[in-house]
Image: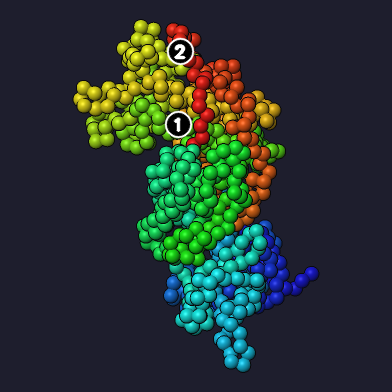
Amino acid sequence: MSKDPLVVFTPSGKRGHFPVGTPVLTAARQLGVDLDSVCGGRGICSKCQITPSYGEFSKHGVTVADTALSEWNAVEQRYDDKRGLKPGRRLGCQATIQSDVVIDVPPESQVHKQVVRKAASARVIEMDPATRLFFIEVEEPDMHSPTGDFERVKRALADQWDITGVTADLPILTKLQPVLRKGNWQITVALYRDHASDQSKIINLWPGLYEDGIYGLAIDLGSTTVAAHLTNLVTGEVVESSGLMNPQIRFGEDLMSRVSYAMMNKNGDQEMTRAVRDAINTLAVDIAQSAELSPHQILEIVFVCNPVMHHLLVGVDPVELGQAPFALATSDAMHLSARDLDLTDLLATTQCYILPCIAGHVGADAAAVALSEEPDKSDDLVLIVDVGTNAELLLGNKTRVLACSSPTGPAFEGAQISSGQRAAPGAIERIEIDPTTKEPRFRVIGCDLWSDEDGFDAATASTGITGICGSGIIEAVAELRIAGLMDENGLIGSPEATGTPRSVAEGRTYSYVIHDASAQGGPKITVTQGDIRAIQLAKSALYAGARLLMDEMDIDAVDRVVLAGAFGAHISAKHALVLGMIPDVTLDKVQSAGNAAGTGARIALCNVAARTRIEQTVRNITKVETAIEPKFQDHFVAANAIPHKTAPFAHLRSIVELPQVSFNTGGGDDGARRRRRRG
Ligand code: FES
C-alpha cells in the first residue's frame, strides 16, 4: 500500500495518493478534479481557492492533522492583503500536501459549476463554455534563435497548458506585439474551442493577468422581437437582459411577407439583412452599456432563430424558404466570426454560433427548445408547442422525436383581432363570463384586481382599458363557449337566443361586448365573429399539426403538453383545452416552459458540449412537413369545431361542462375554408 498521503476531494469524492510536497492544484489535475486556474499556478489569479478540512473523517477513513497542508506562504499572504481570502481558504496552487487531507472545492473554484436555471425548473446548466482565459509567460525574442512572437505564444500554451494547434485571426495578430510588450511578456489569452474540430483559436488577449470578466450574448432573434441575455462566461450569471423590436417589421409583419419582399424587390434581402444586423449591433452596445461593460468584453454570441430570420441574418436570400420543397441553404449549425456577419468593430473578434435548423420551417429556435426541454430524454410522450406567429411543434420521448411547424398566423398574439393589441398595460389578459348572467369580469395587465372588484376603476385610471391581448382573446373565446354564448361551430348567438344584450348585431353576425367606454370617448371592446374565425383558423392549424405528428407516431393521445414561448407562459391550460388548441390531457399535464428558445440559447452559450448534443439530436429528429401532407387539411377541418368535431376531449369534459347550443340559422359557412398561409 502506498505510503504517500491520501488526498480526498469533495464534493467529487475523487481520491488518490500523492508524494509529500505535491501542490493541491497538481493533485486535483491528476485526479481530474474540477479546480479552476487561469494563471497556471502562479498564485495571481486566485481561481484555485480550496478549503481544507481538519479532524476525523470516518466516512473517508482519514484523520487530517493541522499540518496536513504546507504553511501559509508569502504568495497567499500577498493575495490576502490585496484582495482578501475568505477564512479557511487556501490557494490550491500554493498549498502543498504534507499528510492525509480532505479538501473541499467551493463552487466558485469549479470550472464546471452548475448554474440553477429558473426557480420553476429543477434543471441546471453546467458551465463549460467554449471560451476560457489562460495566463501565459511568453519567452522574449532572441536574435540567435529567431522565432515569431505568435510562435512563442503557441509554445507557451503548449508548455504551460498543454494546448496545441492554436490559431489566431488577423485582428489578434495585429494587436499581439504591443500587448506582449506592455504585459512584459506575460499575457492573458481568451481561447475559443470549436467543438466540431476541437481546434482552439485565440479570440482576444490582454497584457498581464486579465481580471475584468468575459461575457457572451444569447440572442433569440424572433420575427417580431430580438431578445438578448448578457451572460458571464465564467459564472453563467445573466447580468443583463434586453430586447428590441425587429426592425424588419417595416418590410412585412410576418415571415412570409418578408420572403415576398425579398422576391419582389431587388436587393430586398440585403436591406433586411442590414436592418437585422444593425439591430444586433445596437442591442450589443446598449446591453453592454447598461451592464457597465465594454462591448469588447462580449466574446461570444449564440443565436437562435427561425429559418427565415436565420437566412436573413447570415445574408442568404430566403426566397427558397417561400416555396416547396422549402430548402434551407444549410441546416447545420454555423460557426462564424462577428466580422463575417458585418457586426460592429467593437465585436471584431467575437465568435458567433448559430444552432442547427431542423427543417425548412422548423428552425434553430425549435432546436433550442429541444435543447432546453429535452423531449429526447423524456420517459413520457411529450408534445412541446412553441406558440408564436408560426407554431413549432415537437413530439416525442426517449425513443423518437418528431417536429413540424404549423401556420397559425398572428391571431394568438392579438393581431388580426378587432380589439387585439400587444400584451401591454391596459390590455385585457384574463376574462370570465358568468354562465347564468352572461356578464363578463376581466383583469387587465398592470392591475391585480378583477373588473368587478372595488378599486378597479381607480387602479386602471392611468392605463385605461385599451384592448385585448393574445391570452385574453383565447380566454374570451373559450369563455363564450363555456357560457353557452357561442356554439361548437364558433357562431355567436343573437340577443334573443342567448338572453343577453351584450350580444349585438354586426351585419349578419353577432359580437359580444366585453367593455364599452364609447360614451366616455373610450374604446368599445368586443369579440366579433371575425375574431372567432381568426382564432379558429389559428387553433385548428395548431391542433392539426399536433395531430399529424401523433399520426406519424401512431398514437391517439399524448402524456404531457408543454407550452413554450413568452405567450405560452400566459395561456390558461383550461381555456387552451376548451378551445381545442392542444390535444386533450388532464390539466396538471399542461406545463409552461416560459421562453424555452432563449433558455436553449443560454445553455449553448454556457456549455460547449450542449452544442454537440443538439447537433446530434437535430440529426435524429424526424421532420414532418405539414404543407404537403393531405391529411393536414382533414385534421384542420375537424379541429375547426370548439373544442373538436370528433375527438371526445373526455378529460376536459370531466371538469368543464360545455353547453349543447346551436346558433346556426343557415347560410353561414362552417369556417372550414381557409387560405393556407405561413408567417
Ligand atoms: Fe492562479 Fe492559484 S492557479 S492563483
User: Which one is nearer the viewer's eye here, 591 or 336?
Assistant: 336
Q: Are marks 2 and 1 in contact (CB under 8 Å)?
A: no
Q: Residue at x 46, y 17 (%)?
A: 490
Element on which disc 1 rests: helix
User: What residue type is disc 1 on?
Assistant: Phe
Q: Quadrant of residue 630?
A: top right
Q: Identify the mark at residue 668; answer none if there is no mark.
A: 2
The N terminus lies in quadrant: bottom right
Q: Residue at x 43, y 75 (%)?
A: 82
Q: Residue at x 71, y 38 (%)?
A: 399
Answer above or below: position of 561 versus 353: above
Q: Is mark 2 within 8 Å of ligand 1?
A: no
User: Which one is nearer the viewer's eye here, 261 or 110?
Assistant: 261
Q: Residues within 10 Å of mark 2 (few under 14, many from 20)?
A: few
Q: Quadrant of residue 277?
A: bottom left
Q: Residue furthest right?
A: 1
Q: How is the image coloured?
A: rainbow
User: Residue 530 at what x, y percent from top left?
Assistant: 41, 22
Q: Which residue is mark 1?
A: 412
Element on which disc 2 rests: loop
The answer, for residue 380, to whether it is visible in the render is yes
Whether residue 604 sits left or right of residue 493 in the image: it is right
Q: Quadrant of residue 545?
A: top right
First of labels 2, 1 by sequence position: 1
Answer above or below: position of 554 versus 679: above
Answer above or below: position of 279 versus 54: above
User: Residue 264 at what x, y percent from top left?
Assistant: 46, 42
User: What residue type is disc 2 on?
Assistant: Gly
Residue mark closest to the camera, 2 vs 1: 2
Answer above or below: position of 254 versus 451: below
